[in-house]
Amino acid sequence: MALPLLSTFKSKLANGGGSARPNLFKVSIKATKTTQSLLADEEILVKATSIPSSTIAEQALNYGGRAIKYAGFRTYENWTTTIINDEDFAIRNRIQNWMRRLSGKLDGERSVSFGAYSQGGTYNEGVGTVTQVNKNGKDGAVYTMNNLWPTSIAAMPVAWDSSDFMTFDVEWCYDTWTHTK
């Protein structure tokens, strides 16, 4: 079997604009009913994330002593972002406040203004997007997570021997995602 020429491989990349770079992206998280969103200038503080995954579970039907597999329900794993903490803790505080709106204060105290359906019966959910940026600086593929809300916010270790930026992970739950180009 003959291998394709290197020039053929390179021309395929050149025709499509080259390969996508994993370090060229931006993330936007907007809460639809509250003010707990990332601001446009804070998009750069998202250090890492991923394009969302989806899985179609198999569903077996037994017939004649054999399992016949059919496509089942689509499921979506939680989405994780790694965020660089700013000195004012502004992003972390907004996400924590969003979580408090969903389930009450950290000490368990609740009031009528808290809960998933607060503020007149509106649900405290949001929309998250990951936009792949092309090498020329223009937006490329966009993945949008719908009905998004923070399900966990990770601890932030502090140590005398560390000189890295302080980061924290946030895990987000969502219902569906869409893709546009």
Image (cartoon, helix red, strand yellow):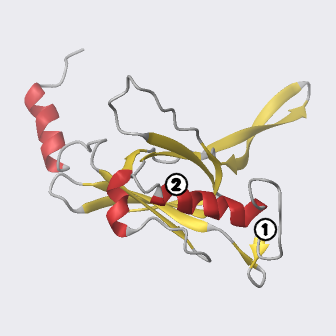
The image shows residue 99, relative to residue 24, as above or below, that is below
- Which tag is nearer the camera, tag 1 or tag 2? 2
For this orientation, the residue located farthest to the top is: 1
Q: Is residue 148 in view?
A: no
Q: Amino acid at mark 2?
A: Arg
Relative to 129, is 114 on the left or the right? right
| Marking on residue 92 | 2
Task: Give residue 59's quadrant in the image.
Answer: top right
Please tell me the numbered disc located at residue 176. none
Residues at circles 1 and 2 in contact by the CB criterion of under 8 Å: no
In the rendered image, which quarter is residue 143 located in? bottom left
- Disc 1 on helix, strand or loop? loop
In the displayed structure, 40 sits above or below 106; it is below
x%, y% of residue 153? 60, 46
Which one is nearer the viewer's eye here, 10 or 34?
34
Image coordinates of residue 72 in percent, x first then y, are 75, 46
Residue 131 position in % (x across, y down) = 36, 58
175 vs 157, nearest the viewer:
157
Give the residue at x 75% y 41%. 70
Q: Residue at x 55, y 63 (%)?
A: 94
Could you tell whether 59 is left or right of 51 in the image?
right
Mark 1, other Cα within 10 Å: few <14 / some 14–19 / many ≥20: many
Which residue is at a point 39% across and 52% down the rendered structure image? 86
Vertical placement of 107 versus 32: above or below? Answer: above
Mark 1, residue position: 115
Crowdedness of circle 2 by 10 Å Cα count: few (<14), some, many (20+)?
many
